Image: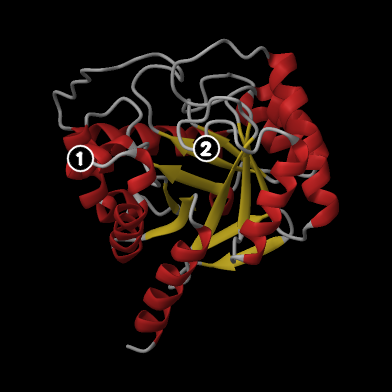
Amino acid sequence: MRLDLGDRTYDLTTRSLVMGILNRTTDSFFDKGAFFEMDAFLLRAEQLVNEGADILDVGGVKAGPGPEVTEAEELERVIPALEALHQRFDLPLSVDTWRASVAKAAYAAGATIGNDISGFGDPEYLPVAAAAGATVVATHIRLEPRVPDPAPEYPEGVVVAVRDFLTERAHQAEACGIPSARIVVDAGLDLGKTAPQSLELLRASNVIATLGYPLLLSASNKTFLGRMLDLEIDERRDASLAAAALGVTLGCRIIRAHDVEGTRRVCDVLAAVTEAE
């Protein structure tokens, strides 16, 4: 399993990468805007790098419903942040956006990954990424970002629906000239899924991994973990690490996390066990 990020190539046969979450939002579900100001944002980035992050993922708009964030506002939040990170740290940067215009500006600012939770809803997203030589993340979502979806149904079964959706989106990216080593897939836990559906998808990570593209797991502190154990947002650390461990065991090779230190340890222990076989 190979992954190309910019001029770096990673062998993900046994190794898993940790993607540290960096929000420049005022209403993130987890940090509630604690890192919106640039000084706090950069201190948080330094902490994640010191804890072992392989990738930093920068987002300016939360995935769930909330006040409108215009394209201009998103650019103002994300681009200076990426430029500052690019100057300070020598590791791949990801932009968490579904707007092709923001992704294009982010690539110019130093990002090498477009992390799109919309499933490439913007028709210019893939051409922009292909022109920049960027890596893309294809994520399953049933409706659109920021649109409530409280009772999603999948007549064919959620695993089949997600597998087929991601297959189609990955092939779409390849048809736009993006090599398979620059395509990542994400089942989109909590995005248009009930808690049981997200748990089913996590359990079926090995099925999604057989598509042949690196599989990203974004389970950190999410609602389905809270509902499973009746946990508040600030009580989900252990559940998030357990989900990460299960995901890696079942083939996930990029773990998007708030707790980089704990997730790094999980990934390193599992890699050591696998390599020792």
| Towards the viewer: 219 or 178 | 219
Dot 1 corresponds to which residue? 230
How many neighbours does mark 1 have within 10 angstroms: few (below 14), some (14-19), or many (20 or more)?
Answer: few
Answer whether labels 1 and 2 touch (C-beta < 8 Å): no
Identify the residue shown where x is 33% and y is 22%.
142
Q: Is 23 on the left or on the right of 229, as rendered?
A: right
How many neighbours does mark 2 have within 10 angstroms: few (below 14), some (14-19), or many (20 or more)?
Answer: some
Cα separation, mark 1 vs mark 2, equals: 19 Å
> Number of marks in the image?
2
**Residue type, numbered disc 2:** Asp
Residue 166 on image: x %, y %: 38, 37
- In the rendered image, is residue 111 in sight? no
Dot 2 corresponds to which residue? 31
Q: Is 39 on the left or on the right of 21, as rendered?
A: right
Label 1 SS: loop
Of labels 1 and 2, earlier in sequence is 2
Identify the residue shown where x is 30% and y is 66%.
249
Q: Is 43 on the left or on the right of 135, as rendered?
A: right
Residue 24 on image: x %, y %: 65, 33
Q: Quadrant of the C terminus?
A: bottom left
Q: Is 209 on the left or on the right of 264, as rendered?
A: left
| Towards the viewer: 242 or 166 | 242
Identify the residue shown where x is 58% and y is 19%.
123
